[in-house]
Image: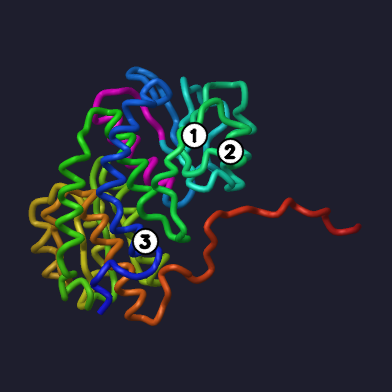
Amino acid sequence: MGESVAGGHTEQEIASQPACWRRAAQLALDVAGSLPAPGERIAVVGCGTSWFIAQSYAAAREEAGHGETDAFAASEMPRGRRYDRLLVLSRSGTTTEILQLLARMRGTLPTVVVTADPRTPVTEFADQVIGLDFADEASVVQTRFATSELALLRAHLGYDPGPAADAAQRVLARPLPPELLAARQFTFLGTGWTYGLANEAALKLREAAGLWTEAYPVMEYRHGPVAVTGPGSVVWLLGTAADGLADEVAAAGGTAWFDDEDPMAALVRVQMLAVALARARGLDPDRPRNLARSVILAPAGPGPTP
């Protein structure tokens, strides 16, 4: 039922992640001077998946004591707020909101972009560019680029991605659990740096398989989201479990899933599940509905004639 990760572009890119994370850790040493220094107050922005990776990195950086870090969708970064550096995450380097933001911020503060292709238009606007060409993707749906940029950024904070890569290899070698394959609805929960991963996990299942998914901070689950849990629901925790959560999920008729692997490896399991469920529903995860590899907006035309 699609439990293998051999086949199309997406499956191959998912399977390559452990090697990409180890390579990202080595790159982190080479580009350390371009990444935010301890004590800097920074903003980190992205769109879609990259926004959720920005959330994860922002929380991880603050948890590591490196300084105040705000994460924004590129279109929503507030004007007039003062930062020491702007860090931009963009796989394609062509997204309209990213280019507009960099143009607006040019000359006001140092800007650094992490991208898969350093030859894209984003290089014309950024002060420094970090290229992760080894993690570029043919797929529309992001997998290895997103996790590799997070591995890079966490390595810069002092976290060794080796154990997460080992855990991902174990996940890739195992079949998907039947209770996950049978579910009709997923709620992902995270706390701290794993809340961004929860948002990304929910997005993967929406993008690839068109499933009903939600994501929340773990303690917010009781404040309303529990109402959607019922038979066929999985509540999947990425990170530290909350006391009594499993009992509450069971009482609501759902299944609580507490992944015993590193949260980044758990995200790999979600990616595998997205592919399997897409194929089970007759969808092609390499060609998701209504999506393109980069969102490039056409310039606004003239208004209506009076």
Please state which amino acid type lies under the numbered disc 1. Answer: Val
Q: Secondary structure at mark 3?
A: helix
Give residue 79's position: percent from left, percent from top. 57, 31
> Are the two marked residues, 1 and 2, in contact with CB atoms closer than 8 angstroms?
yes
- In the rendered view, would you say 30 is above or below 22? above
| Position of residue 132 measured from the top left corner of the image (x, y, whole percent) | 42, 41
- Where residue 300 appears, as percent x and y from the top left, is 75, 52
Q: State which region is magenta.
A: 50-70
Name the residue rendered at 59%, 45% in the picture: 97
- Reading the image, the residue beneath label 3 is 204
Q: Earlier in the sequence, mark 1 or mark 2?
A: 1
Q: Which residue does the image show at 38% across and 63% down from the upper left?
A: 10
| Residue 147 as seen in the image, left or right of residue 176 | right
Q: Is residue 33 left or right of residue 247?
A: right
Residue found at the very far right of the displayed protein: 306
Amino acid type assigned to the residue bearing label 2 in the image: Val
Q: Nearer the viewer, mark 3 or mark 1?
A: 1
54 part of magenta stretch: yes
Which part of the image, by quadrant, shows the N terminus?
A: bottom left
Disc 2 target residue = 122
Give the residue type at disc 3: Lys
Q: Which badge, 3 or 2, is on the more N-terminal residue?
A: 2
Q: Quadrant of residue 229?
A: bottom left
**CA–CA distance between discs 3 and 1?**
23 Å
Q: Secondary structure at mark 2?
A: helix
Q: Residues within 10 Å of mark 2 (few under 14, many from 20)?
A: many
Which residue lies under the disc numbered 1?
Answer: 113
Q: Main secondary structure of the magenta part?
A: helix
